[in-house]
Image (tube, helix red, strand yellow):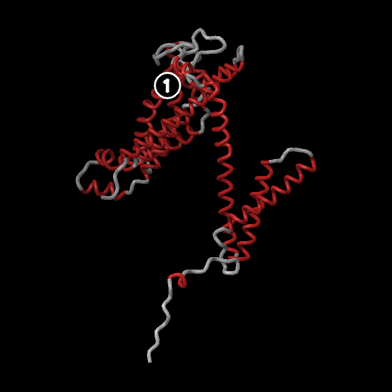
């Protein structure tokens, strides 16, 4: 007589949920430990605040919570899952904590600028300048136009120089003494203070036009000096990531080197190059010191980079805050509004750059 084994339903084959005695923490274990640390440290700080008659210390509560969580998760995981897993959870917690700490000032700055900048935002702020304006009213149209023109001219100067320099370093100057010298100089330029770039541009134009000269193009040259090393380093790294097999395949088909670079290497790395270019623009668009020396301060519109002083948003925010008149709140509101406008411009430029990189990046797959 034959017997058949009882059929096993999917529910009977399912794995049991992790328990503390199974050698694995349950999925809710990490969040449970974090919640326990939050509650315990919160109670301690609440009792301390009530006993001392002071306010609840939120920053201290979060710090103690993070430390308590790291200690608890390490001990519990080591007891249940073993020492290696405990150390892994400790390092994971440290990395997550570092990320949250890095986000705190970013969120704080964004929140502060948005809250304070909205008060100064109006239609007049974007459609008028500060010409003949004392006290309330006026706007930053002249500063917005100056920022866009000066930054655009700096990008036109620095981007081709930076990309061509990176192409030489990667494609033509490998293990070359000249290439090593250029790399060293680029590394040195990366760390120069922005005021030095402004002094260089000012001294350069003083040689040709005499002392006291102020022009928008001088600011563009100063910003280009700051942009070039960033463009070179970022483009160089992106070009090095392109597989040599692509270059060799192009050479095998008889394509010359310059055309291989233009049609294979650059399109393959265009997304990373665009990101590096936008990083360089974001690096310089908020500079104040070099533009104070080179472009100067003005309250009127100026569309000509090669004639007269030109206002920019960073300088506008600085002058409004430092030279407050009556009423003082009007000047402070304009300064915060200029800062908010500058952040929005940088965000829009980054979105446009990502769109360009997505459109022109090589299409993978079929």
Q: 304 or 2, which lies in front? A: 2
Q: State whether residue 342 is above or below residue 250.
A: above
Q: Is residue 48 above or below residue 91?
A: above
Check the image and name the residue furthest to the top.
132
Residue 347 seen: yes
Residue positioned 49% across, 16% down in the render: 139
Against 268, is 122 above or below? above
- The answer to whether 1 appears left or right of 291 in the picture is left
Looking at the figure, which quarter contains the N terminus? bottom left
**In which image quadrant can residue 177 be found?**
top left
Residue 332 versus residue 217: which sits nearer the camera?
A: 332
User: Among all residues in the image, which is located at the extreme left?
Assistant: 254
- Where residue 112 appears, x then y in whole percent? 57, 30
Residue 6 in the image: x percent, y percent?
Answer: 43, 80
Q: Quadrant of residue 356?
A: top left
Q: Which residue is mark 1?
A: 150
x, y percent for residue 235: 38, 38
Q: How many marks?
A: 1
Mark 1: secondary structure: helix
Q: Is residue 309 left or right of residue 52?
A: left
Residue placed most toward the observer, 319 or 253: 319
For the question of whether residue 202 can be seen, the reply is: no
**Mark 1 nearby-residue class (10 Å; few <14, some 14–19, many ≥20):** many
Residue 307 image point, x, y percent? 41, 12
Residue in the image at 44% along x and 11% along y = 308
Foreground residue among 89 and 275: 89
Q: In the image, is residue 343 above or below residue 272?
A: above
Left or right: 33, with 114 as reference point: right
């Amino acid at each position: 007589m034959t017997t058949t084994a009882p059929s096993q339903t999917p529910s009977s084959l399912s794995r049991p949920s992790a328990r503390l005695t199974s050698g694995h923490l349950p999925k809710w274990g990490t969040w449970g430990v974090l919640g326990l640390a939050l509650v315990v440290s919160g109670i301690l700080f609440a009792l301390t605040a009530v006993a001392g008659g002071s306010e609840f210390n939120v920053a201290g509560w979060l710090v103690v919570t993070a430390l308590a969580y790291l200690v608890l998760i390490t001990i519990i995981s080591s007891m249940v899952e073993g020492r290696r897993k405990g150390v892994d959870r400790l390092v994971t917690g440290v990395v997550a904590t570092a990320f949250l700490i890095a986000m705190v000032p970013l969120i704080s700055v964004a929140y502060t600028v948005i809250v304070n900048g909205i008060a100064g935002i109006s239609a007049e702020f974007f459609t008028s300048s500060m010409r003949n304006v004392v006290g309330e009213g006026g706007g930053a149209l002249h500063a917005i136009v100056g920022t866009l023109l000066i930054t655009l001219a700096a990008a036109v100067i620095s981007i081709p120089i930076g990309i061509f320099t990176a192409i030489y370093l990667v494609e033509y100057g490998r293990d070359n003494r000249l290439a090593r010298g250029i790399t060293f100089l680029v590394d040195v330029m990366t760390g120069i203070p922005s005021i030095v770039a402004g002094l260089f541009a000012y001294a350069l134009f003083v040689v040709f036009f005499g002392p006291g000269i102020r022009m928008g193009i001088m600011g563009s040259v100063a910003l280009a000096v700051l942009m070039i090393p960033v463009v070179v380093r970022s483009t160089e790294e992106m070009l090095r990531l392109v597989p040599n097999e692509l270059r060799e395949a192009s050479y095998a088909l008889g394509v010359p080197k310059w055309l291989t670079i233009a049609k294979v290497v650059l399109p393959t790395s265009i997304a990373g190059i665009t990101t590096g270019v936008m990083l360089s623009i974001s690096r310089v668009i908020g500079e104040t010191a070099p533009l104070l020396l080179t472009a100067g301060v003005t309250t009127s519109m100026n569309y000509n980079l090669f004639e007269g002083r030109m206002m920019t948003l960073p300088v506008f925010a600085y002058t409004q805050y430092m030279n407050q008149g009556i009423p003082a709140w009007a000047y402070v509101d304009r300064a915060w509004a200029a800062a908010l406008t500058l952040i929005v411009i940088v965000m829009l430029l980054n979105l446009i750059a990502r769109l360009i990189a997505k459109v022109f990046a090589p299409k993978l797959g079929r």
